[in-house]
Amino acid sequence: MSEYSPSRLLDKIIIRVPEGMRDRIRRVADSNNRSVNAELLVLLDRTYPDVTKLDEHLQDIAEIVAKLPAENRTDAWRSVFERLEALRNDTV
């Protein structure tokens, strides 16, 4: 990698992991055809999604519910809200 690589401008985080964890991450990364760094970025992005991604997902849900027959929309929204509440409780 060149010392002038754009990746050198990115934020860096150094972490310490228990013995053997790096190897476990490497095995999973290899099975996904990723570097260890790329694998960790995927996991971090899933755990800490960008707010704009959440907005996009919510918009997708709204569009799906809007396509349902009018008589099913209230139940669909209730189901969405119940699921979100359950997920919220799991993360609090």
Image: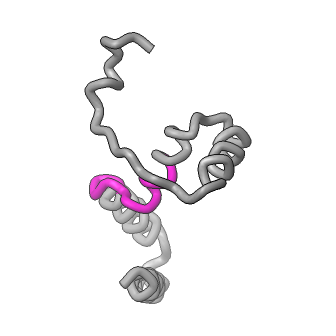
- Residue reaching furthest front? 19
Quadrant, the N terminus: top left
Indicate left or right for 40 with 55 as reference. right
Q: Is residue 66 magenta?
A: no
Q: Position of residue 29 (x, y in %)?
A: 64, 42
Q: Residue at x 43, y 62 (%)?
A: 47
Quadrant, the C terminus: bottom left
Indicate left or right for 31 with 16 as reference. right
Q: Residue at x 32, y 39 (%)?
A: 12
Depth check: 78 or 66 in front?
A: 78
Predominant secondary structure in magenta? helix
In the displayed structure, 14 sits above or below 5; it is: below
Depth check: 16 or 88 in front?
A: 16
Q: Residue at x 50, y 39 (%)?
A: 37
Depth check: 89 or 82 in front?
A: 89
Q: Position of residue 88 (x, y in %)?
A: 38, 82
Q: Position of residue 59 (x, y in %)?
A: 35, 61
In the displayed structure, 16 sits above or below 92; it is: above
Toward which corner of the image does residue 81 lie, by quadrant? Answer: bottom left
Q: Position of residue 20 (x, y in %)?
A: 65, 54
In the displayed structure, 24 sits above or below 74; it is: above
Depth check: 60 or 87 in front?
A: 87
Q: Is residue 47 magenta?
A: yes
Q: Which residues are magenta?
A: 42-53
Q: Residue at x 31, y 12 (%)?
A: 4
What sort of colour scheme is used for the picture?
A: one colour
Toward which corner of the image does residue 55 lie, by quadrant? Answer: bottom left
